[in-house]
Structure formats: C-alpha cells, structure tokens
C-alpha cells in the first residue's frame, strides 16, 4: 500500500477544521476586537452570510460543571379531558414563560417521558428556582352541596378543608377553573383597606360564574349552600357568602392576604393555569465555584493522563509512539471540536467519558503496533510489516469498538439523562478514535516507511532478525 | 507461560474475590445513594473546619433520619429521607445560620421516590439488554461459544465490582461504596471495556485457528493469550494511569465513580486474560465438537 494523497488531504482538512473550531474563541475575539485574555463578551458565533449559516461555537457545560439548579417536575392529577402528554406540553409552555419572564436566557425547559418536565437553570440556586417556577397554582371554584365527602374528594382536596361542613355538606366542582382566568391583579378592598386579588374571567368563565352565583343567592345567608369556595391547588383560600349574582366577568378573592401574598397569588394566577398538579420529582443544585473546581480538576487529570500516555507510547514503541502521540492529539482536537460545534452538553460523567476515551483511543494504536512488531520480527520489510499490521489488527479494532458502540446505544436509548450524556461522549470518542487511530496512523506509518532515515528497526523497538 | 494449564488456579482466584462480594450482597445488600433510595443530600462546604458530629447533632433536631459524614476537614455530606419543600428551606436556613456555610462550593440533590424506583428497574434492564445485544453480535462474528464465554467474563467483572461495592458500602460503611447513577454508568463502561478486551484475544484465537498448525486447541488458545498479553496490559495500563490521576484529584462526589472504573478495568483485563479464553478450553473439553 502506498501513501494515499486523498486520505492525507482529508486528514489535513479535518485537522485544520478541528483546530479552527477549538480555537474559535480566539478567532472571535480577533474578529470583534477584543483582548485575547480576560472574560469574553458575547457568544462566539460563526456566521457565513452567503450560505445562510450561523452556529454558536462554545463548550456547553452541564449544570454540574457550571453551577445551577436542575429540576425534574412530575405532573399528576391531570385535569379531565386532557391526555397526560398534552398536559405535559401545556405545562412546559407555561413554565417556559415563567422562566423566560424572569430573565434567565440560558435556561432549558423540556419534556421528558410521559409526564415529566426537566428544568435547568444555570447560575440559579434552588430557592431562587422555586420562586421562579412559583407555586403551582391551580385555581378551582367549588360549591357546597348536601352529601358526604368521599375518598376521591379527600385525594383531590386538603381533607380538613373538604370536610369543613361535614357530615352534612360536601364540596362540588363548578367546572370554573384557572384556565378561564384572563387576568389577575392585586387590589385593595375599599372598605377594610386590606389587600385582595381581583380576577377577570373569559366569556365561558364569566357565564359559568354568573349562573353559579345566581343559583347560590337563592340559599339563605349562613347556609353553606350560599357560599362560594375557592381552592388554590388543594387548599381552601376563600369561602365567602354570595350576596348577589356576579355577572360582570370579574370576581374578588379576599382571604386574609398580606400585600406580598396577594401579589404572589396574582402572579401565579397570571402565569396560567397548570393543567394538573406539578410536583418536584428530583432536584439538584450545584454551587458555582464547585462546578468550576470540578472542571479544573478534571482537565488537570486529563492533561496528566494524556502526558503519561504519550510518554509511555514514546518509551515503549519509539518511533511509532510519535505517530500514536500525533494521532492522539488529533483525536483530542477533533473530539473537542465535535463537542463545541454540535453543542453537546458536557457533564461531569461526560467529561470523565472523554478522558477515559483517550485511554481507549490509544488502544487501536497499541494493537496495530504490536502487530507491526511481530511482522518485523518475522523478517518482513518495514512497508510490508506496516501494511500487514494495520490489516491484521483491523478485525479486533472493528469488533471491539462495535461492541462498545452497542453499549453506548443501549445507554442512550434507555438510560437516565445523566447516562445519556455519558453515552454520547463515549460514542463520539469511539467514532473519532476509529478515524484518528486507523486512518491517520496508517497514513503516517506509510510516510515513515517511505523515509530512508526512519528505516532502522531499532526505532521500532525490534532487533533485526538474524540472517537465516 | 502456561495460562490455560493453570486455569483452575485463576478460576479459584476469581472465586475468592467474587464469593465474599456475593455473600455481602445477599446478606447486606447495597448502600444505596439517594438516586436509588430517594431522599435529600446536602454536600456542604464550610469556610473553616466543622465536625460532622456537630452537624449530626443539629440535624437530629429535625427528625429527618439524617446521617452526616465528614467529607474532608471543611465539608460534610448529609443524607436524609425525602424532605418537603418547606422542610428543606427550614433546614438550609438553620444550617447556614449555625455553621460557616460556603454556598458557592456546596451542592444539593433531591430525588423523589418515583424516580428512584424507575432507576433501579432501569439499571438492571440496561445491563441485561446490553449483554444480549453483545451476545448476538459476537455470535455473528465468532460463534455462540465465544459469545457466551465473553459474557461470562463480563458477568465476572460486574460481580467483582458490585460485590466490592457492597462490601465497601455495607461492611466498611464507607460513603465511597454508595450505589448511584454514576456507579451504574461505571458498570456499563466496564462492560464495554471488558468485552473490548476479550474480543481482542478472541480475535487472535480466531486467526490462529484458521492457520493450519499442529497445535491443539488448548495450546492454540494459550499461544493467543500470550501473543495478546502485551497489548492488553499496555492498554489497561494507560487507562489505569488516567484513572488513578482522576481518582486522586477528583472531588469527593465522584471519587466513588472513578474508583469503580478503576476496579472494573483491572478486573476486566484480568477476566479477559485468565477467564474468558480458558473457559473456551473448558467448554471444548466438555463438548469436543
């Protein structure tokens, strides 16, 4: 086999592209007249206007590396008439609006599985996150009717509130809920000067509310059947007498609010009615400095590992070790470029997968070199030994990497989010290493075989075979 | 070097490591992290040294089944049963008031019971699915005997790893031996690595068998192992270097992860040399077709 000029050109192009992407932050600084050190302004973006191409290029760090809060929310008690996944999508939209209106641009809100939502808020601690997401306020209007409270009601409402007039009366849903609210605002009761919340209904809500209050007024004052009960989530916040029918499309909730709690309730009601009960399934909060320290330590370990591997390859395999080291550096450059260009989020597990794959990437080289050594010992010429070495090492490289890819595939499709990240980085590592270790190494070895000074067998850690 | 001839010795050595682990798993189980057990975990950093016992005493007043462990002189790891949002806020505020807390270097995690249940089922399932797919692939590339021996070696590594972690977590009660999502990731990586290593040797056996020679199957396998051993050890050494570096300087919360990888990779190298291929010979003797 001769040196293949097309493959060499491909390697050169890939290497240049990889280095361009890796060093893109510097290109961007130069292009935008920024100093080369210190904090960077803006997000490095590559745009080629006449191709309509625009891509942000930077390392996307997971929350565990940059600090922030990761929440997994679960939607239960979905309102009737909505499928769980539709409810999930509505909730995603509502939560996204809440998050964005709080000014957290880099946050992520996305559906996960059937009834989960993942919220990622970089640089935000858990307390702030809870405030941003707000309490999951789902307002419902109820009336009291004769009857006894059953188990289903106790599940839906706070038992103490549901049984307020037990055993004679039980609450019954009027089908008026928060989704019919068009606006809510904090207001003040003109008589008592206490804070309250004014809500406006849409057409449907207005009609229902009008009919409902008209019916309630027929009962005498003091009778629970005259009352209007407003629940927020499970709790009774308002249980007022209805004095006259209310048909103007608005109502006032008074309920012993403070100015702040009235304001908070208004905001929650405005943020839209969540289509079910949203509860926290899991939460992770990472301090800002902790993430940065982890990155620093991991990179240090990676650099140290890389240095040891290169040293080892040079000492053990001599000249081919140089080739392997070049291939390994190329590997690291390409992989990092892929992460940056495709915006793959690096988490701690992913970073470890990457560092680990450096060790595995060198394996293909080791396999090839061991074979080359054997062929040389068997007395083949350098060129023939290198060709045979690559050729005979290939089945092992192929089969072993495919089995690793199978594991990655399983991890990606069935694993938890954290595991997915690891699977992606490992799979990219395996893919890139096949290129760097096989194509690159093979071509470099062929170049070596063509150089006269490189033909001494001692350079390959092999003693010349005794003349037969 | 006669590795195949002394195979029983090597099988015994594997057994000596695996058996205590299996006993520990059967009787004590695992020290489950909150990923699997559900609950809350504070990884707190302080601006000056704080004794875990002092934090424990404070946590006991909340009655939330808290266990507090020292994590370096300036840090503690607190694990509790699942807390409500209000409880969590109260505890945090209280700790911030009583101890010199450094929030920017601390972390906190909460896992609800539903997620925890899914993970337990998921982890076992992942290992099973991955193993089955690998068996299918190897059966196509080699044959089913090779595939099953490779999977036996893989299971060996899984048992070594989980067994040692059961002992670390339950017998020695070390936080390092905690089973969490990262540990599952480590196990799955080790599976990939173990099969990788085994395949390289099997590939050599496949190649040597194709060439006409006067060697018996047993001698052939032994030769193949010896021809591959330099590569196996070299590759593992490079990975082990990286991992030792990672282990030594990694922060407390991922030390368990890097240690698991380290154990798994050493075990994977051992099993591919001393278990997988000798098992082929045993099988051939029992069923000489």
Image (cartoon, rainbow, N blue to C red):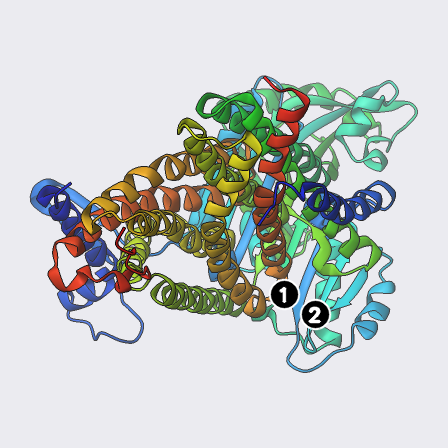
Image point (35%, 49%), residue name: A374
Looking at marks 2 and 1 on the same chain, the residue that comes earlier in the sequence is marked by: 2
Tell me if label 2 and label 1 are in contact, CB under 8 Å.
yes
| Near-viewer residue (A48 or B145) | B145
Residue at the front extreme?
A468
Residue A14 appears left or right of A408: left
Kindly indicate the quadrant of the structure image that contains residue A145: top right
Please give left or right for residue A223 compared with residue A268 in the image.
Answer: right
Q: Is residue A116 above or below residue B15?
A: above
- Which residue is labeled 1 in the image? B252
Q: Residue B288: x, y in percent?
A: 62, 20
Q: On the rendered image, what quadrant is the N terminus of chain A found in?
A: top left
Q: Secondary structure at mark 2?
A: loop
Q: In front here: B111 or B3?
A: B3
Q: Position of residue A47 (x, y in %)?
A: 16, 50
On the picture, is A275 further left or further right than B286? left
The residue wearing badge 2 is B71
Can residue A376 be seen at all in this image of the molecule? yes
Task: State whether residue A233 appears in this view.
Answer: no
């Amino acid at each position: 086999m001769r040196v293949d000029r097309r493959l060499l050109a491909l390697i050169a192009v890939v290497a240049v592209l990889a280095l361009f992407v890796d060093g893109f932050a510097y290109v961007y600084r130069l292009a935008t007249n920024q100093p080369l050190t210190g904090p960077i302004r803006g997000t490095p973006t590559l745009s080629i206007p006449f191709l309509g191409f625009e891509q942000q290029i930077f390392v996307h760090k997971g929350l565990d590396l940059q600090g922030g809060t990761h929440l997994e929310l679960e939607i239960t008690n979905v309102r009737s008439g909505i499928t769980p996944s539709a409810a999930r999508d509505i909730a995603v939209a509502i939560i996204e609006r809440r998050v964005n209106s709080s000014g957290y641009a880099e946050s992520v809100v996305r559906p996960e599985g059937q009834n989960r939502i993942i919220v990622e808020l970089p640089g935000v601690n858990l307390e702030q996150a809870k405030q941003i997401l707000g309490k999951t306020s789902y307002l419902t209007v109820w009336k009291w009717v004769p009857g006894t409270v059953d188990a289903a009601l106790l599940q839906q409402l706070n038992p103490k509130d549901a049984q307020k007039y037990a055993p004679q009366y039980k609450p019954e849903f009027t089908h008026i809920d928060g989704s019919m609210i068009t606006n809510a605002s904090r207001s003040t009761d003109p008589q008592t000067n206490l804070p309250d919340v004014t809500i406006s209904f849409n057409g449907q809500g207005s009609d229902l509310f009008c009919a409902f209050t008209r019916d309630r007024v027929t009962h005498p004052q003091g009778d629970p059947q005259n009352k209007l009960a407003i629940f927020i989530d499970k709790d009774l916040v308002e249980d007022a007498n209805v004095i006259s029918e209310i048909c103007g499309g608005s109502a006032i909730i008074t309920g012993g609010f403070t100015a702040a709690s009235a304001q908070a309730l208004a905001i929650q009601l405005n943020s839209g009615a969540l289509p079910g009960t949203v509860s926290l399934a899991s939460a992770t909060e990472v301090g800002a400095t902790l993430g940065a320290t982890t990155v620093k330590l991991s990179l240090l370990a990676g650099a140290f590992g890389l240095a040891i591997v290169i040293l080892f390859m040079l000492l053990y395999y001599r000249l081919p070790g140089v080739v392997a080291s070049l291939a390994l550096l190329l590997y690291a450059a390409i992989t990092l470029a892929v992460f940056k260009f495709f915006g793959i989020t690096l988490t701690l597990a992913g970073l470890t997968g990457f560092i680990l794959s450096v060790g595995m990437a060198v394996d293909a080289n080791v396999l090839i070199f061991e074979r080359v050594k054997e062929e040389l010992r068997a007395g083949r010429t350098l060129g023939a030994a290198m060709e045979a070495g690559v050729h005979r090492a290939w089945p092992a490289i192929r089969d072993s990497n495919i089995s690793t890819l199978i594991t990655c595939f399983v991890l990606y499709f069935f694993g938890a989010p954290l595991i997915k990240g690891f699977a992606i980085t490992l799979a990219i590592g395996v893919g890139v290493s096949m290129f760097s270790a096989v194509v690159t190494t093979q071509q470099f070895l062929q170049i070596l075989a063509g150089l006269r000074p490189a033909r001494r067998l001692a350079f390959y850690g092999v003693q010349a075979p005794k003349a037969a | 070097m006669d590795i195949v001839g002394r195979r029983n010795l090597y099988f015994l050595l594997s057994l000596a490591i695996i058996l205590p682990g299996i006993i520990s798993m059967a009787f004590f189980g695992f020290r489950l992290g909150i990923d699997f057990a559900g609950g809350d975990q504070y990884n707190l950093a302080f601006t000056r040294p704080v004794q875990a016992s002092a934090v424990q005493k404070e946590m006991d007043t909340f009655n939330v089944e808290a266990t507090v462990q020292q994590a370096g002189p300036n840090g503690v790891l607190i694990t509790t049963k699942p807390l409500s949002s209000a409880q969590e806020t109260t505890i945090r505020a209280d700790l911030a008031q009583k101890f010199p807390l450094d929030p920017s270097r601390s972390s906190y995690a909460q896992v609800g019971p539903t997620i925890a249940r899914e993970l337990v089922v998921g982890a076992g399932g992942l290992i099973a699915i991955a193993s089955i797919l690998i068996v299918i692939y190897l059966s196509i590339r080699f044959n089913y005997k090779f595939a099953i021996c490779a999977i036996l070696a893989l299971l060996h590594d899984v048992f070594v790893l989980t067994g040692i972690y059961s002992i670390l977590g339950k017998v020695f009660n070390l936080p390092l031996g905690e089973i969490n999502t990262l540990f599952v990731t480590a196990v799955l990586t080790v599976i990939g690595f173990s099969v990788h290593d085994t395949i390289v040797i099997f590939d050599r056996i496949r190649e040597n068998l194709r060439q006409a020679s006067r060697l018996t199957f047993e001698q052939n396998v032994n030769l193949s192992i010896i021809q591959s051993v330099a590569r196996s050890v070299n590759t593992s050494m490079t990975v082990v270097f990286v991992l030792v570096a990672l282990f030594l300087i990694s922060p407390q919360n991922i030390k368990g992860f890097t240690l698991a990888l380290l154990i798994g990779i050493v075990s994977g190298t051992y099993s591919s040399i001393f278990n997988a291929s000798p098992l082929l010979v045993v099988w051939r003797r029992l069923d000489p077709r």
